[in-house]
Amino acid sequence: MNVKITRDECVSCGTCVDVCPEFFELSEEDTLNQVLEQYRNDGRLDEGTVPPELEACVTEAADLCPVQVILVA
Ligand code: SF4
């Protein structure tokens, strides 16, 4: 499963990090949600590959994001 975050529309609420801290973090630089370094695609902050064991929590985070900027496919 892949994830894509529309970071410039993130409102930094922290819900995704509360639900799935194993995959998401809020950037110390711009406070926006980003993929943890080890799961990034080509080093991108906004795209990552989700390991099977984290698919449930990433999906839950996507469902709960108030502005629906976490896309999973
Ligand atoms: S839940 Fe959505 S709006 Fe909130 S920090 Fe995560 S990506 Fe940003």
Image (cartoon, grey):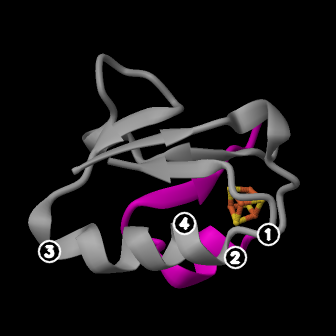
Q: Is residue 33 magenta?
A: no
Question: At label 3, which amino acid type do we have?
Answer: Glu
The dot on residue 15 is 2
Residue 7 position, x and y percent, is 70, 36
> What residue does disc 4 label?
62
Q: Which residue is mark 1?
A: 66
Q: Which residue is mark 3?
A: 53
Q: CA distance from mark 3 to mark 1?
A: 24 Å
Quadrant of picture, ligand 1: bottom right
Q: Residue furthest right?
A: 11
* Category of crowding for the residue at label 2, using alpha-carbon neighbours closer than 10 angstroms: few (below 14), some (14–19), many (at least 20): some
Q: Residue at x 40, y 68 (%)?
A: 58
In three-dimensional space, the C-alpha distance between marks 3 and 4, rounded to whole angstroms, equals 16 Å
Q: Is ligand 1 closer than 8 angstroms to the Cβ of mark 2?
A: yes
Q: Position of residue 1 (x, y in %)?
A: 21, 51
Closest to the camera, between mark 3 and mark 4, is: 4
Determine the CA span between mark 1 and mark 4.
9 Å
**Residue 14 vs residue 63: left or right?**
right
User: Does the segment drawn in magenta span residue 23?
Assistant: yes
Label 2 or label 1, whichever comes before in sequence order: 2
Residue at point 68%, 44% (across, down): 27
Work out whether mark 4 precedes mark 2 in sequence or the reverse, and give the earlier one. 2
Q: Badge 1: few (under 14), some or many (20 or more) residues near its Cα, within 10 Å? A: some
Instruction: Mark 3 or mark 2: name the one nearer the start of the chain.
Output: 2
Vertical position of residue 58 compared to residue 36: above or below: below
Q: Secondary structure at mark 1?
A: loop
Give the image quarter of residue 47: top left
Circle number at residue 35: none
